[in-house]
Image: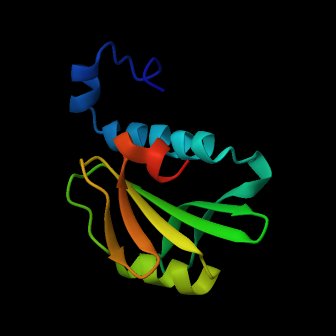
Amino acid sequence: MHALLDLEDPVALERHPKVGASWEGFALSEVVRCLGAHEGECWFWGTHQGAELDLLVTSGNRRLGFEFRRTTAPRRTKSMAIALADLSLDEFVLVHAGEHAFPMGERIRAVPLAMLEQEVG
């Protein structure tokens, strides 16, 4: 993606409007790698009303939901509650660009990308 956008270095990426999409794609691939998830276990989910989940991983009887936000101050959203209820998720993880992991509610936690391996893997 970076080559197609002619982004030659991290500074150019930081200034580009697609920096969030780039970060999200990288974070998603890291979650899949950490979990050892297979292609048939990974899904995008969304409703007609606008609630969505960036990554749904179904492995055996477990259902894990992931949202990716390039922010250092993630917040709980209505979409998270809808995904938890509609999909009967065992856990919802919001992967963010901050430094600390913390609970955000019942079965919801925020995990920084830098701690993904130890928190999710």
Residue toward you, 9 or 58: 58
Residue toward you, 108 or 14: 108
Furthest-front residue in view?
118
Q: Is residue 60 left or right of residue 110?
A: right
Query: Which residue is rendered at x = 52% and y = 40% of the image?
Result: 30
Residue 104 picture location, percent across and down: 32, 74
Q: Is residue 70 above or below residue 30?
A: below
Query: Which residue is rendered at x = 33% and y = 71% of the image?
Result: 103
Query: Which residue is rendered at x = 62% and y = 82% of the image?
Result: 88
Residue 57 picture location, percent across and down: 65, 60
Furthest-bottom residue in view?
85
> Residue 22's image quarter?
top left
Q: Is residue 6 above or below residue 50?
A: above
Colour theme: rainbow
Residue 92 picture location, percent across and down: 49, 69
> Residue 36's image quarter?
top right
> Residue 19's image quarter?
top left
Q: Is residue 39 left or right of residue 16?
A: right
Residue toward you, 9 or 80: 80
Query: Which residue is rendered at x = 55% and y = 87% of the image?
Result: 85
